[in-house]
Amino acid sequence: MNTNISISLDKRRSKKDGTFPVIMRLGHNERTTSIPLDISVSEKDWDDKNKQVKKSYVGLSSVTRLNNLIQKKKADAMDKILKLSELGELNTLSVSSLRDKLTQEDKRQSFIKYGESLVKDLKEANRIGTARSYNDVISVLSRYKGKDISFTEINYSFLTKFETHHMSKGNGINGLAVYMRTIRAIFNKAIKDGIIEKEIYPFDNYKIKTAPTEKRALEANLLSNIVNLTLEQKDPCFHARNFFVASYMMYGMNFTDMAFLKKDDINNGRINYRRKKTSKLYDIKVTKNLETILGYYMQNKTEFVFPIIKRDTPETQNKDIRWARKRYNNKLNDIAKMCGIDTNLTSYVSRHSFATQAMMQQVPLNAISSMLGHSSLKTTEIYLKSLPSDTIDDYNAKVLGL
């Protein structure tokens, strides 16, 4: 068996207090990796010859118990390795896969550690926005409990107490819903990964609450005011108006997808791109008005159509998008005043307005859902839950025979 484990002090990674982590060094098929033991001591307190903490260590009451714990973790790991060998699985695993097998028990116990591993995977997959959402939840729960949290701790009682804590600080119910949906997503992922059992899933009993949001779709006449708004290139709202109209004309394309839209995605009068969130492939015809807007931006020298992304790495690009969206929304407030719109105008309004206008033109719900890139009709129905007031007025007139 070409696999072994040794205990060592990792002197490459000094902590702020001057101590070093005690690790298990895993060797497998001529590759090595380390497994932290959540124990750290100074170099003077480490017996490198016997691979244990010296008795002179004063960090706790019983050094013998600490050394026994270290040896137990090593013995447990070797026991798992022997079982994998007996099952014929050991030689099929890479050293990183074997490490994951050996540390699965820690993940099973820790919602935080498992969540952190998902954040790392999401960043490697360039899903920076989702990684940030997961990390936000991990940070909030860590501050709330002040310690690590196991999956089994997050039950119905925990969630209701966290809800009370969140609301007591003056936070909104929809902000809480974002956290709860992310917690639920981590649970669902852990179940699929075999980290936890379905029996401890808390969301069969706990129901995520939301409050009705302000109507986002614009009425047809107000939408026309923006589409027909003519601004000089030097106007501070020039790009914001173009972004809004282009989004509306591209099936309500969201801001992130607009940011990543490349010139190479536009060919022969059509736009072909994959949505970042769902990887759904789009094929959109470029209309005359849209062609005018795109033609202006196609003259720039970057690979992207719109001047939103300035940097190269996934994390810096995500920051570029967030800052650009913030500036965009600020300029939309100015556009709203120009166009006589007294509701809050944001980047989401073009998307909701497209969905509502499609419904008004009697486009089938499943087609609208496909155009928006939704994974379920329920999400589309949320977009369409509020009809414009002028439409309600027309329906009322018909009912009254006016």
Image (cartoon, helix red, strand yellow):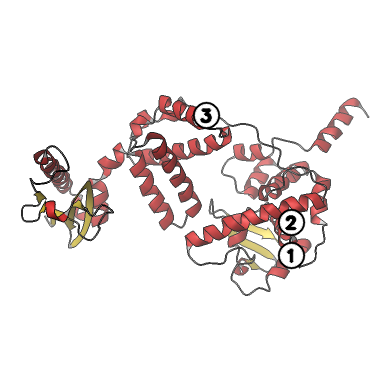
Q: Nearer the viewer, residue 48 or 126?
A: 48
Q: Is residue 192 left or right of residue 239?
A: left
Find residue 85 and name its label.
none
The answer to whether mark 2 and mark 1 are in CB contact below 8 A is yes
Left or right: 328 in relation to 321? right
Which residue is under mark 3?
168
Identity, as a three-letter code, of the amino acid under mark 2: Val
Measure how far apart labels 2 and 1 are at the Cα level: 9 Å
Image mark for residue 293: 1
Give amino acid for label 1.
Ile
Q: What amino acid is found at the position of numbered circle 3 in the picture?
A: Ser
- Residue 90 rendering spot, x and y as whole percentages: 19, 51
Q: How many marks?
A: 3
Task: Return the residue at label 2.
Answer: 245
**Residue at (47, 54) in percent of width and height:** 127
Q: Is residue 333 left or right of residue 308?
A: right
Q: Nearer the viewer, residue 307 or 197?
A: 307
Between marks 2 and 3, how big is the CA–CA gap? 40 Å
- Residue 150: image location, x then y, percent: 33, 35
User: Disc 2 or disc 3, which is closer to the eye?
Assistant: 3
Residue 38 percent coordinates (x, y) = 23, 46
